[in-house]
Amino acid sequence: MAGRAEPSACAEQKSGREVVRPKGRLKVLPEEILQDPLIDHLDLDRNRLKNVAGLARLSKLRKLILSKNELLEFPPEIGSLPLLETLNLNQNKIQQVAEGIFSRLQLLKQLKLNNNRLTELPGDLGTCEDLRYLNLSHNAIQKVPETIAKLGKLEEFYIENNKLRKLPAQLFEGGSLRKFSARANPLREPPDEVCEGGLRHIRSYFKQLQTSESQEDKRIKTMFLGASMAGKSTLCQSLTMEKQVTIAEKARTIGIEINEFQIEDFSFLCWDFAGQQEYYLTHHVFITPQALVVLVIDLHRYDVDDEHSFKELVGFWINNVFMRVPDSVVLPVGTHVDLCDKDEVQRKKKDIEEKIKAMLTERKENLTQRCEKLRKKRQSELYRDQANTLYNLSEFSLQVLDLIPVDYSRNNAIAEARLQILQLVRNENIFPNAIRKLPVIYKEVEKAITDLIETHEVPEHGIVTLDELLQTENLRNIDSEQLKYILNYLHRIGLIVWYQEVKTLEDIVFLKPSFLITLFKMIVRHDLLEQLKSIPPRILRKESAIKPDQDKWNLDLQNKGTLHHKAILILVKHQLGQSGEKDLQDIPEDIIGDEEEKGKLFQILEHFDICLSSKPQALNPEACEFNPGSRWPQLDHTPALTYLFPSYLMDAKEVSANWKEDSEEDLHIRAFFLPEIPEGFFLRVIIKLCNFIYSHWVGKERCLVAVNGRKLLLKEHNEEANSYIEFRCKGNGSDRDVFVGRWCLIMSAIQRMKKVVEQWPGLHYSLKTPCRNPQCDHYFDWPDLDEKDEDIEQTEEEKIKTCEKCCRNFQTEFLFCTSIGSQALNATTEVPSFSAFRQYSDFIMLGSKMDILTVPHVEARLPIH
């Protein structure tokens, strides 16, 4: 433990080099280490070091690990280690690096300085000519020094989440760089959407700039969000038409609408998102970072004395934007102003602005307090990753601007609103990358695609294969590889849709994103049940269906949240037929599919975890024997292909019936979220889990899966200041490794939850386990899941955990067993380490769906602190 005098060090031999990893949590370097001049590998990861005085005495060091400590400055002693090849200083609080240190590290090959507080880099970093790996992510660096571009042996370079506006072209001219990422920077040159395409796309971009002219691209993706009937579509259409447009209530937005308008030299690509809850699940697919978010608020409905009014009309949307795209700019716009008097408008405007400011301040304070709580823990070094994550979240700068009231009763209201929006996007402090530098060929390809659509050289629905697009007259002379890069860019800014990452969709380009969204909103909509009921008998007969089929479809949707594939096919064909456009009825068959095979539309829905398909059983359980090589007897009737849409489920009766009751012997863990669980988040988690395990039952806010007799229950609890997902697991009561098997099942579910968390950069979660005292409601924080912890011997103090509330002591390694007691765990029970659990979870995740979960025998113990 920290504070003990001169902890001993353990040494081991690895490839003939001495590796020293001190035991305990250090505040100063142990003298016994400093007295050994032969040490060449020193691992001081995850300690409490604020300085490394005396380090210069270890002149033979080749590898030095100082990550996850409390260093405020770059240790100048490091300059006295001329043989150093690997230096890890990530996850400290270093603010600057003095000149003259790196010039003395000529053998340096790997440098990690990510997750610090750097704003600039020393010029002499470029003298480390042998540097192969460099990580500078999560700092506040504004410029990449030109000297770095001259590092001819650099193979991997990461500089994500900084303040870069421009990347040096020289960095990409050599052939040594193999891996590079500059994600989440306000880049103009190249634009962030180009950087997302990877090294080849970046190199292609700079090559085009060298061989042709460049052009400024002044385009802002503009997303209109807000509660249902707030007036989003009216505002969007009015800004487009430059005059007030009245939209009837029955014409309200279903799903998403797309259009574009121009204000002087700026283009605004507008995405109008419907406000009903049923559509939130698909919104996530299209809400992207670095956009202008217009939050439309009905001022007539808004009540300054009703907290629920603020939460429903304002707070909910601010929170979800922050969690999904935390670096966006939000412009609140008040509508229905003509129904309010002048003083009322000003009072409501002031109230909304003050509450938004208080809400953002509270969020930052909550993150800071949580971070400080972790830092003040007696073993704070074990929570360093979580503390860094919280710090990074607190540094996000969602900008919420002053509210603009728009009074349609005034003749010049729309003109004034357009001018105010233009002034905002011209402000570089608000939109640092609104103007992007592009090679001329990017705009030429965009115009060529626009011409194809306007001259009707492609189908009305805009769906073409990649080969067809490459062979069109306007594009066939462009290098095919270069064209793919440009299509990728146009996809990322929202002009086209090309899901290149989905294997079955890599050859399909949607030149009209609006049509793909049209297909989406035929299936994911607030009135889907009414639409199914409205299919006329003549359409049913034409598709070889009858009224009882229709009744079953409606009943299954209403009671089970299940949509039959055939019902969707008929519904989509019927609605497209009603459009009156012949071209829209001639959609390629593989987009919608047929009765036997799902189409690409459903593959997109599944790819984004919007629905879960039931796969017809391939094997016949009634077959009498298994003969390898011989034909397997098939079932007489293949089950109908259906899709589960959890968002349509109204209750959890089936889940509760199969789970029975909670028990003290359940393995019980909770994942708590700040600020709350995003809308649609839990649905995506259970879809990922159920897509992996066949035996499952899904209900509203609940999901149950079963493997080898073990049952795992997930429950969503989402309320202010108390948002969590609960994981409970029952054993089968017979297998020897009852604890191990249940733990691995929970860990596999947590792995899937973590995958979904990655889609919400502004969301924080922490894992906790309850006190084993049934009368106590305290929860213990999980430490970071660090594989190195298992190699550090626990002190006697670390083996015991004391509850802060009931003051009872528990063995640390058994803490996560809840109240299992001696029936399941005893002195001889072998409990795996976190690292081993992750390995098994990864092993489990290799398959697709499964009915059997096998966990190997494990001998390591569980070092949970």
Image (cartoon, helix red, strand yellow):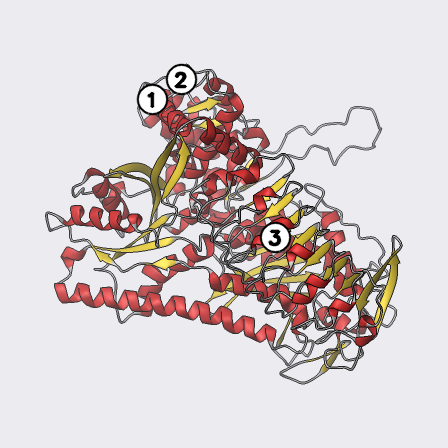
Residue 731 visible, this angle? no
- Say above or below: 526 vs 704: above
Q: Which image quarter: residue 137?
A: bottom right
Q: CA distance from mark 2 to mark 1?
A: 9 Å
Tell me the mark number nearer the camera, choosing from 2 and 3: 3
Q: Amino acid at mark 1?
A: Asp
The structure residue drawn at horizontal position 45% and vertical position 68%, both measured from the top left corner, is: 364
Look at the image and tell me in which quarter the C terminus lies.
Answer: bottom right
Q: Amino acid at mark 2?
A: Asn
The x, y position of residue 6, in whole percent, is: 80, 79
The structure residue drawn at horizontal position 63% and vertical position 34%, both measured from the top left corner, is: 175
**Numbered tag placed on residue 474 in the rendering:** 2
Q: Secondary structure at mark 1?
A: helix
Q: Nearer the viewer, residue 63 or 553?
A: 63
Q: CA distance from mark 3 to mark 1?
A: 49 Å
Identify the residue position indicated by label 3 in the image.
125
The x, y position of residue 687, in whole percent, is: 57, 47
**Numbered tag placed on residue 451 in the rendering:** 1
Pointer 2 and pointer 1: residues touching (CB < 8 Å)?
Answer: yes
